[in-house]
Image (spheres, rainbow, N blue to C red):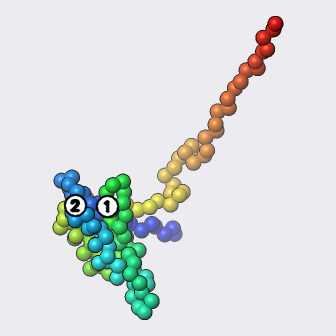
Amino acid sequence: MAESSPTQYFIQGITKSGRKFRPSDWSERLCGVMSAYGPKAKGPNARLQYSIYVRPTMIDDIKVVILDARLRDIEPMAFDFVLNFAKDNDLLVTEACELPPHHGTQTQAQSQPQAQPQAQTEPQTQPKD
C-alpha cells in the first residue's frame, strides 16, 4: 500500500476581506513560537530553528505559514493553536497535499513525450548567370 503524502495548510497573510495582515513579521513570530515542536528541538544540542512542521515562506509577495498536518499527531494542542490563530485573525487558509510525480491522473497521451515536428527544407537552386 502506498503511503499518502502529508497534508499541509497554507496560512496566507491576507484576511478574508482582502487586507494585508499586520504586523509585517507575523509569520516569523508565529513560527518562532512553534520552533519547540520538531526533531532536535530539545536537549543539550538543541538550537534555535524553525520547526519542520510550521515554517514561514513567501509566495509572490504574500507571507505564508505552512503547517504540516503531522503536527496534529505529535502535539494536537500546538496544531490547533496555529489553525485557531488563523481563524481568530480571519486569515485565508488553503489545505493541500503534494502529489507524487506519477500519481495516476495523467492520461497515456500526457505521459508520453510529444514528437517534435521536423522542419522541412526544400533544396535551393543556384541562380544561373
In this figure, which residue is indicated by the disc labeled 2?
21
Amino acid type assigned to the residue bearing label 1 in the image:
Lys
Contact check, label 1 and label 2, Cβ < 8 Å: yes
Residue for badge 1? 63
Mark 1 neighbour density, 10 Å: few (under 14) some (14–19) many (20 or more): many
Task: Give the answer, above or below, for where 79 lies relative to 64.
Answer: below
Determine crowd level at label 2: few under 14, some 14-19, many 20+ residues with C-alpha closer than 10 A: some
SS class, disc 1? strand
Q: Residue 115, image x and y in percent?
A: 64, 38
SS of the residue at dot 2? Answer: loop
Q: Earlier in the sequence, mark 1 or mark 2?
A: 2
Instruction: Residue 25 in the image: state x and y as whole percent.
Output: 27, 67
Q: Position of residue 92 (x, y in %)?
A: 25, 59
The residue depicted at 35 percent of the width and 72 percent of the height is 54
Q: Is residue 110 visible?
A: yes
Q: How many marks?
A: 2
Calculate the distance from the C-alpha at mark 1 to the C-alpha at mark 2: 9 Å
Residue at (35, 76) in percent of width and height: 71
* Furthest-bottom residue in this view: 44
Q: Which residue sits at x=79%, y=14%?
A: 126
Kind of residue at disc 2: Phe
Pinpoint residue 21: horizontal percent, then vertical percent.
22, 61
